[in-house]
Amino acid sequence: MEYLEILFAFAKAFLVGGLICAVAQVVINFTDLTAGKILVTFMLVGVVLTALGLYQPLVEWAGAGATVPISGFGYLLANGAMKGAQVGLFQALTGALSAASAGVSAAIVFSFLMSLIFKSHTKYN
């Protein structure tokens, strides 16, 4: 029975993450928005949905399917800021940074390591 629960958790994560990515692909295909604008929009959607209390139930239901996409980063920032705001104004400003510090630090370290291993070049070289 435990295997079915794990399989169902994977299915939920794949479904939600896939839907978020499918929406992003539709935006890419049918608009002239740049990748940066799309990323910022999706992150801000995560922040707004968190502020409205709508993203937390999605995270609880879908797990990594909701936290891994860029909208999950917005959720993480907003959640940290809201928890910090319960303590004080300064913690509201730093709460988002402390909540996301592990992920950002890991991205920086692994990006640096990959830059040492692989030679970067432009797409057209």
Image (spheres, helix red, strand yellow):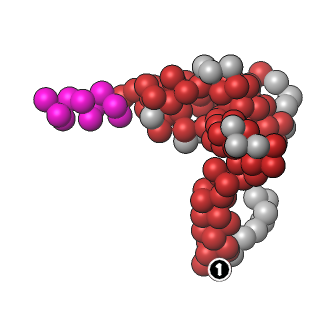
Locate residue 114: give its quadrant.
bottom right
Front residue (pair 92, 39): 92
The image shows residue 16 at horizontal and vertical percentages of: 50, 26
Answer left or right for 51 relative to 60.
right
Q: Mark 1: which amino acid? A: Leu
| Residue receiving disc 1 | 116
Locate residue 5: give its quadrant.
top left
Magenta stretch: includes residue 94: no
Front residue (pair 39, 48): 48
Q: Image quadrant for the C terminus?
A: bottom right
| 11, above or below 89, in the image | above
Number of callouts in the render? 1
Residue depicted at 65% across the width and 80% down the height: 116
| 122, above or below 31, in the image | below
Front residue (pair 101, 44): 101
Answer left or right for 37 relative to 102.
right
Residue depicted at 62% across the width and 21% down the height: 53
The image shows residue 4 at horizontal and vertical percentages of: 20, 29
The image shows residue 96 at horizontal and vertical percentages of: 71, 47
Q: Is residue 42 in sight in this rendering?
A: no
